[in-house]
Image: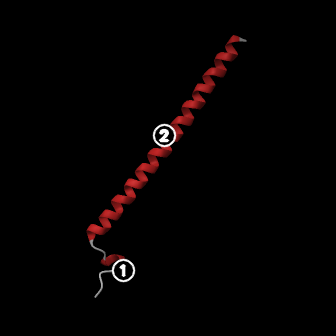
Amino acid sequence: MSNSFDDPAEEPATTVSANLTEQMLHLTNRFEEERLKLEERTFRTDTEDEEQSEGGKKD
């Protein structure tokens, strides 16, 4: 009998747990990257809006 698992149900729990942990870390990192990008875009948009509204007041 070989150690390769053709049926995922036969994989040891530690292997499944390690795989799930790796996937969760990857997704968490990806989420943080996207959140920071969105935050940066929002900050830029807010700053541009403030500059435009200040420019409008001076006219």
Determine crowd level at label 2: few under 14, some 14-19, many 20+ residues with C-alpha closer than 10 A.
few
Structure colour scheme: secondary structure
Quadrant including the C terminus: top right
Determine crowd level at label 1: few under 14, some 14-19, many 20+ residues with C-alpha closer than 10 A.
few
Compared to residue 43, the image places residue 25 above or below, namely below
- Identity of the residue drawn at 27% across and 69% down: 13
The residue beneath circle 1 is 7
Relative image position of residue 47 (x, y in whole percent): 58, 25
Relative image position of residue 6 (x, y in whole percent): 37, 81
- Identity of the residue drawn at 29% across and 81% down: 3
Instruction: Say which mark, if any, is on residue 41.
Output: none
- Where is residue 18, by image quadrant? bottom left
- Identity of the residue drawn at 68% across and 16% down: 55
Left or right: residue 53 versus residue 35 is right
What residue type is disc 1 on?
A: Asp
Relative image position of residue 29 (x, y in whole percent): 42, 49
Left or right: residue 10 versus residue 38 is left
The residue beneath circle 2 is 36
